[in-house]
Image: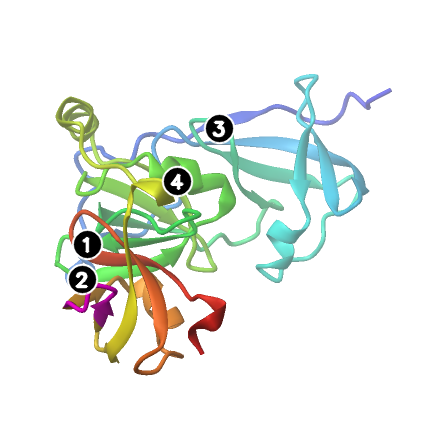
Amino acid sequence: MRTNHYILGVSILIPFILGSGAMAQPEGEKGAAESQHLGGERVVLGHVVEVRSGQARIDMGTGQDRFVPMGVRKDKRLPDLKEGDLVEITVNDQNLIVDVHLPGEVSRHRIVSGKLAGPLETGHETAVIKTPDGKEESHRIRPVARSKVASIPVGADAIFLIDELNKIVDVTFASAEAARRAAEDGQLKSPLKGNLNRVVGSIVETLKGDKIAIRAQDGTVSSYEVRPFAQPRLHTLDKEDLVVLLVDDEGKVTDVAIPPSSR
């Protein structure tokens, strides 16, 4: 029988950050603000009732337990959860777990305002955010947030929650107006791999800056801009190596495949 002195299921509703004062930003930090949560997120309290097979089972006091992978904390070098621990679980507006902390632990999340610079790469593991000052930031995306980030149209005003490991853990539209425009305009969302233009050829000029030149199978030579998250795979290639580029509707390389016979 569960002891009645536990304070379970206590919800602390986090107000929407887009109030009149919340968007004020210090000089030199345009596009970023010190904050902990996005609109629609909330913190709920629970107790760890069991730790098994790399997961902690959390009693939320609602009759339905939540399961938290222990790796979420190990990645941040936080101590393992143990039976009896009181925990604070942050869940987003889709009731998905964003973060898990013990009371009193410091959470160094930050908010980044901006737009997706282009469609996500295949697998939706990385996103490039263009901030209001024109800079681009590349971030890995935690699995829990990939479907939400992929649903944000390219160019739509959005707000991204970045965790201690510099990964995106949540995202929301910057305003109700931005969400309405995205729905009405049918803006481009991150496509599946099959929706990208496939370019097969050999390298004429290796990656310099963010550009690469490819000779296609018909003999034509074209230069392509490579998005930051796709560049590491091209750094190891030499001239004449065979490569397959996946190019988005802006003519930029968003994914790379290297045939086994290319070297």
Question: In the picture provided, is 178 more to the left or to the right than 81?
Answer: left
Amino acid type at mark 3: Ile
Q: Nearer the viewer, mark 3 or mark 4?
A: 4
Which residue corresponds to the image point at 21% horizontal and 77% vertical from the top-left? 209
- Asked whether residue 73 is drawn in magenta, I would say no
* Callout 3 touching callout 4 (CB < 8 Å): no
79 vs 187, nearest the viewer: 187
Q: Residues within 10 Å of mark 2 (few under 14, many from 20)?
A: few
User: Which of pointers 3 and 4 lies earlier in the amino acid sequence?
Assistant: 3
Question: In the picture provided, is 152 more to the left or to the right than 122?
Answer: left
Q: Which residue is mark 3?
A: 12
- Asked whether residue 215 is drawn in magenta, I would say yes
User: Which of pointers 1 and 3 lies earlier in the amino acid sequence?
Assistant: 3
Residue 53 is situated, as x and y percent measured from the top left of the image, at 79, 45
Q: Which residue is mark 4?
A: 37
The residue tagged with tag 2: helix, strand or loop? Answer: loop
- Rendered view: 175 above or below 123: above
Quarter holding residue 203: bottom left
Amino acid type at mark 4: His
* Callout 1 touching callout 2 (CB < 8 Å): yes
Alpha carbon distance from label 1 to label 4 = 19 Å
* Callout 1 touching callout 4 (CB < 8 Å): no
Part of the protein shown in magenta: 214-220
User: Which of pointers 3 and 2 lies earlier in the amino acid sequence?
Assistant: 3
183 vs 100, nearest the viewer: 183
Alpha carbon distance from label 2 to label 4 = 23 Å
The residue tagged with tag 3: helix, strand or loop? Answer: strand
Residue 164 is situated, as x and y percent measured from the top left of the image, at 47, 58
- Image disc number at residue 17: none
Q: Residue furthest bottom?
A: 238
Q: Which residue is mark 1?
A: 131
